[in-house]
């Protein structure tokens, strides 16, 4: 049996996990992300953590097939990172750098795409060939798998679906600097914004008026207990989701759309609302897509990162 690591680099913690070659997660742990000095210590810290783990558990380095790593920024097929703003990173080859530090082969990818690969392999997309994965969190990210292969794109920025434009007349800028992106309406922050705007325009009673800092969860909770305003706010959100996924799936024609991220904790009601609206917008031949919830949550990135390494190095024999 051979083994490997799946590593998911976030802005505050780095998640590491140790897998066997069947994809069974044997162990997982976190280390802090040290973003001082433009993040120069992040990869050495990861390399130390990997080496310490192998030493502590008396695991021979010959049994390690490789490392996979997901990072919050674009990564091209050669492993070159093109700026991770959160981490302070510029442009460099992360695969070569981490390989030099550890002595193991490394495959790298964008974190959202890597999480999509994890869900495709072991989560909500398992058993399918073609999947669209959408994370509805603070922002909107995702990944696309076609014929079992992750879409990386030509510049390492494939499936930046949160920045597809839904509303060209938007006057407030998105985090990316453009106007009217999907994530301005479909993220958790987007739902909170739709709620604030609704309550400012309409005068009807709503339990949400007593909530100090409305979050997406408050809107789902209020709708669940019958609040009519909350239901209207969610209908607006579902309409945006329907336009977004209807257009995307008309292009991709997936078997399954997997929804993850904090908003997906709303569960079945989210799937039902999105699916109904989706059918209003999708091209008829692509309307058979199923909807499912993500199931790996915070571990999706580690699973996907290890799968990158397994696909790249799993068949190589030393
Ligand atoms: Zn944007």
Image (cartoon, rainbow, N blue to C red):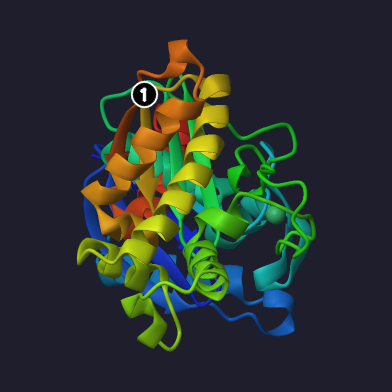
Q: Is residue 249 left or right of residue 183?
A: left
Taking the spot 53% from the left edge, 45% from the top edge, the residue there is 240
Q: Is mark 1 within 8 Å of ligand 1?
A: no
Image position of 188 with respect to 158: above or below:
below
Q: Residue furthest front?
A: 203
> Alpha-carbon neighbours of circle 1 within 10 Å: few (<14), some, or many (≥20)?
many
Find residue 207 and report its image quarter. bottom left
* Nearer to the camera, 110 or 144: 144
* Nearer to the camera, 40 or 186: 186
Count of numbered circles in the view = 1
Q: Is residue 224 left or right of residue 248?
A: left
Taking the spot 51% from the left edge, 17% from the top edge, the residue there is 283
Taking the spot 45% from the left edge, 10% from the top edge, the residue there is 285
The percent position of residue 158, horizontal first and vertical second, equals: 64, 37
The percent position of residue 150, horizontal first and vertical second, equals: 51, 31
Taking the spot 48% from the left edge, 43% from the top edge, the residue there is 239
| Residue 103 in view of the camera | no
The percent position of residue 13, horizontal first and vertical second, equals: 47, 75
Q: Is residue 132 left or right of residue 71?
A: left
* Nearer to the camera, 201 or 80: 201
Q: Is residue 32 left or right of residue 28?
A: right
Helix, strand or loop status at disc 1: loop
Find residue 11 and report its image quarter. bottom right
- Point out the quarter of the image occupied by ligand 1: bottom right
Q: Quadrant of the N terminus?
A: top left
The percent position of residue 133, horizontal first and vertical second, equals: 44, 40
Residue picked out by circle 1? 289
Q: Quadrant of the C terminus?
A: top left
Q: Residue furthest top?
A: 285
| Residue 238 in view of the camera | yes
Image position of 6 with respect to 147: above or below:
below
């Amino acid at each position: 049996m051979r083994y490997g690591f799946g590593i998911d680099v976030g802005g505050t913690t780095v998640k590491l996990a140790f897998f066997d070659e069947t994809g069974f997660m044997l162990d997982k742990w976190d280390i802090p992300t040290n973003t001082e000095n433009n993040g120069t210590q992040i990869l050495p810290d990861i390399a130390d953590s990997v080496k310490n783990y192998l030493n502590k558990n008396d695991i021979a380095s010959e049994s390690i097939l490789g490392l996979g790593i997901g990072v919050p920024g674009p990564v091209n097929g050669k492993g070159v990172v093109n700026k991770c703003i959160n981490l302070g990173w510029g442009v460099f080859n992360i695969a070569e750098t981490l390989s030099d530090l550890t002595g193991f082969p490394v495959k790298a990818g964008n974190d959202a795409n890597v999480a999509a690969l994890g869900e495709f392999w072991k989560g909500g997309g398992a058993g399918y060939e073609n999947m669209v994965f959408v994370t509805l969190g603070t922002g909107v990210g995702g990944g696309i798998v076609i014929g079992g292969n992750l879409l990386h794109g030509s510049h390492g920025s494939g499936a930046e679906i949160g920045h597809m434009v839904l509303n060209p007349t938007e006057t407030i800028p998105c985090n990316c600097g453009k106007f009217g992106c999907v994530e301005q309406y479909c993220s958790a922050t987007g739902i909170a914004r739709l709620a604030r705007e609704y309550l400012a325009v309409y005068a009807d009673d709503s339990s949400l008026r007593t909530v100090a800092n409305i979050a997406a969860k408050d809107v789902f909770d209020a709708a669940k207990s019958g609040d009519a305003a909350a239901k209207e706010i969610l209908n607006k959100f579902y309409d945006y989701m329907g336009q977004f996924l209807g257009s995307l799936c008309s292009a991709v024609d997936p078997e399954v759309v997997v929804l993850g991220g904090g908003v997906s904790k709303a569960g079945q009601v989210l799937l039902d609302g999105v699916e109904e609206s989706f059918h209003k917008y999708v091209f008829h031949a692509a309307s058979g897509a199923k909807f499912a919830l993500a199931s790996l949550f915070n571990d999706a990135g580690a699973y996907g990162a290890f799968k990158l390494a397994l696909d790249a190095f799993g068949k190589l024999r030393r």
